[in-house]
Amino acid sequence: MKRVVITEVLPDMVLAKPVTNANGLPIIAAGTALDNAMIDRLKRLDLTSVYVEGDAGTVTGKTLAELEAELEHRFRRVIRDPLQQHILAALQQHLQRTHGVAGAEGEATTS
């Protein structure tokens, strides 16, 4: 089971936990395979994330290069801050470890 941010939920992902309303009543059952209409419904409910089946370390539809580029973009305004660059490097190393890369794409981690 893994927690996935609503913006990264993809069709055919299967809910591992039910989605409940404010009163705790289930509105989408666990085991439901999501489609585009359900994903839109989840977004309209203002949910931040859902639990889906799968391992926590699996890719959620983005390649390692895409994830690293997104991370670089998020840190673009603090490029001169040594502490922020240290945090960026640690996050890049984490991405590479969790995506099974052992140094193959390490050139993106040097700052």
Image: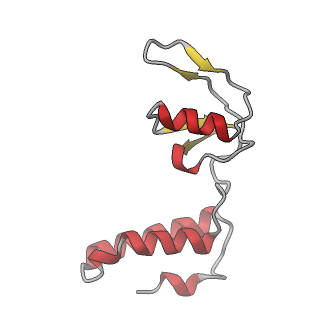
Residue drawn 67% across the image and 21% down it: 29
Expressed as whole percent of the image width and height from the top left, the position of residue 71 reads 45, 69
In the displayed structure image, the side of residue 88 where residue 19 appears, left or right: right
Residue 40 lies in what quarter of the image? top right
Residue drawn 63% across the image and 81% down it: 103
Q: Is residue 86 above or below residue 34?
A: below
Q: Is residue 73 above or below residue 15?
A: below
Residue drawn 60% across the image and 75% down it: 65
Residue 17 visible in the current orientation: yes
Residue 89 visible in the current orientation: no
In the displayed structure image, the side of residue 96 where residue 110 appears, left or right: left
The colour style of the image is secondary structure
Closer to the camera, 1 or 21? 21
Expressed as whole percent of the image width and height from the top left, the position of residue 101 reads 66, 73
Residue drawn 53% across the image and 12% down it: 25
Closer to the camera, 58 or 94? 58
Expressed as whole percent of the image width and height from the top left, the position of residue 98 reads 61, 61
Residue 32 lies in what quarter of the image? top right
Q: Quadrant of the C terminus?
A: bottom left
Expressed as whole percent of the image width and height from the top left, the position of residue 14 reads 72, 36
Closer to the camera, 95 or 59? 59
The total number of labels drawn is: 0
Q: Quadrant of the N terminus?
A: top right
